[in-house]
């Protein structure tokens, strides 16, 4: 199960996820989201959910009370396994001790995904992140002190002007932190982002492919010697601390997604909600179910998706033996 929270405190220069930095409609979006969660309860009738992922945007901009409210609704209307993986995406600047304490005590969240991106202030400034490197380290320390050990950190490599040695330094910092899961993404310069504008104006240059490859190799070498299993192109886990939620996507499991821009898949159809808060809210308030589109996943599409996602993982594609 996925819930999209489309709000961020500040716009990062690389990001094209669906979010707004205006909180004017927050109450209305949350009300509509709750409405959607209630309305679609029959779709989840025969399913026991093994993971819940609150993503965004930045779900940690919500108060612990707002998160508690969302969870009680999800638990009221859907069957969620008692040992389900419950993840929330967070930004370091939100992870204050009091927030973490309330999150731990009043919500079922048992896994944190923290968007660190880099431990270098220069990179963080270039990306327009709200936190500093020191703030990032403090947020990790505070998360552990609050009792969270199942933690993922997001890092980005291939950052303009960052050298392989800067990337190696980031990984060295990570090694000391004893974190069970890492998502390391190569920067992509997406259309309509500030980075796309910077590139057009000649203010930044995309990294040459040989340097990207060097940084990817550095990442793989680091992962090997630090005890991480490289189980998906961008994902690394110690002691099988795989992201159970993402494994679901990569193994074609059905999922329900709530909130603007969220996708759902029931094994036959994929649907996606409109990536526009106003249109989403208006449709739900009026009771008109025209805030999503859908497509049927026929055998050929299903096969292509299976090949594409499987090839990203270390498990690859299951081949049938002759006559099997
Ligand atoms: C939904 S986003 C972020 C969640 C949270 N708001 C944060 O900023 O940490 C998930 C992750 O995708 C990665 N990401 C987003 N845009 C990217 C891009 N253009 N290139 C590479 N990684 C990107 C970042 O590492 C980010 O933490
Ligand atoms: S990276 Fe995270 S905080 Fe930054 S704009 Fe994207 S979703 Fe928001």
Image (cartoon, rainbow, N blue to C red):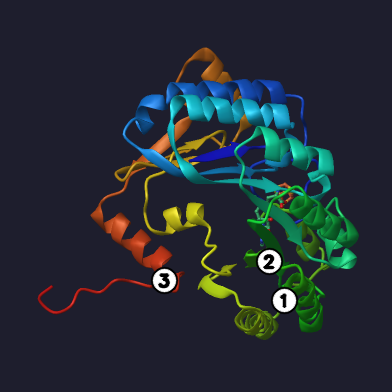
Left of 31 or right of it: where is 35? left
Q: Which residue is mark 3?
A: 311
Would you call the spot at circle 1 few (<14 residues within 10 Å), some (14-19), or many (20 or more)? some
Asked whether the residues under the numbered discs 1 and 2 touch, taking CB atoms below 8 Å apart as contact, a structural biologist would say yes
Q: Is residue 104 above or below residue 172?
A: above
Ligand 1, image quadrant it occupies: bottom right
Numbered tag placed on residue 109 in the rendering? none
Mark 2 Cβ inside 8 Å of ligand 1: yes
Q: Is residue 6 above or below residue 211?
A: above
Which type of secondary structure does the marked residue at label 1 adopt? loop
For image coordinates 70% across by 83% down, the residue present is: 211
Specify which label sits upstream in the sequence, 2 or 3.
2
Specify which label sits upstream in the sequence, 1 or 2.
2
Left of 227 or right of it: where is 140? right
Q: Position of residue 187 (x, y in %)?
A: 68, 66
Q: Residue 273 or 34: which is nearer the viewer?
A: 34
Marks 2 and 3: which is nearer the front?
3
Q: Position of residue 151 (x, y in %)?
A: 66, 57
For image coordinates 66% across by 31% down, the residue present is: 67
Tell me the quadrant of the picture where the C terminus can be found.
Answer: bottom left
Q: Residue furthest left?
A: 323
Q: CA distance from mark 1 to mark 2?
A: 9 Å
For image coordinates 54% across by 74% down, the residue present is: 230
Marks 3 and 1: which is nearer the front?
3
Q: Which residue is mark 2?
A: 187
Q: Which residue is mark 1?
A: 207
Which type of secondary structure does the marked residue at label 2 adopt? loop
């Amino acid at each position: 199960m996925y819930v999209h929270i489309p709000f961020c405190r500040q716009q990062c220069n690389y990001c094209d996820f669906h979010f707004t930095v205006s909180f004017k409609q927050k109450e209305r979006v949350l009300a509509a989201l709750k409405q959607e969660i209630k309305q679609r309860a029959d779709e989840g009738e025969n399913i026991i959910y093994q993971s819940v992922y609150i993503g965004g945007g930045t779900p940690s901009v919500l108060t612990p009370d707002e998160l508690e409210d969302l969870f009680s609704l999800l638990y009221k209307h859907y069957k969620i396994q008692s040992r389900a993986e419950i993840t929330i995406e967070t930004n370091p600047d939100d992870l204050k001790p009091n927030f973490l304490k309330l999150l731990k005590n009043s919500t079922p969240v048992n896994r944190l995904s923290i968007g660190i991106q880099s431990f270098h202030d220069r990179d963080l400034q270039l990306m327009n992140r709200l936190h500093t490197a020191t703030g990032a380290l403090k947020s990790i320390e505070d998360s552990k002190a609050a009792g969270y050990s199942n933690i993922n950190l997001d890092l980005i490599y291939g950052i303009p002007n960052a050298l392989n040695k800067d990337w190696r330094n980031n990984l060295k910092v990570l090694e000391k932190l004893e974190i069970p899961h890492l998502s390391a993404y190569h920067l992509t310069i997406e259309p309509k982002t500030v980075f796309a504008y910077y590139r057009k104006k000649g203010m930044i240059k995309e990294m040459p492919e040989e340097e990207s490859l060097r940084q990817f190799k550095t990442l793989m070498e680091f992962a090997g010697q630090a005890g991480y299993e490289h189980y998906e192109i961008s994902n690394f886990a110690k002691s099988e601390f795989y992201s159970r939620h993402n494994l679901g996507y990569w193994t074609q499991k059905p999922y329900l997604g709530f909130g603007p821009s969220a996708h759902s898949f029931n094994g036959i159809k994929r649907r996606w909600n409109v990536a526009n808060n106003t249109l989403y809210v208006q449709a739900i308030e009026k009771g008109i179910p025209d805030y999503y589109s859908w497509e049927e996943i026929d055998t050929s599409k299903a096969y292509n998706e299976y090949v594409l996602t499987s090839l990203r993982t270390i498990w690859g594609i299951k081949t049938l033996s002759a006559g099997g």
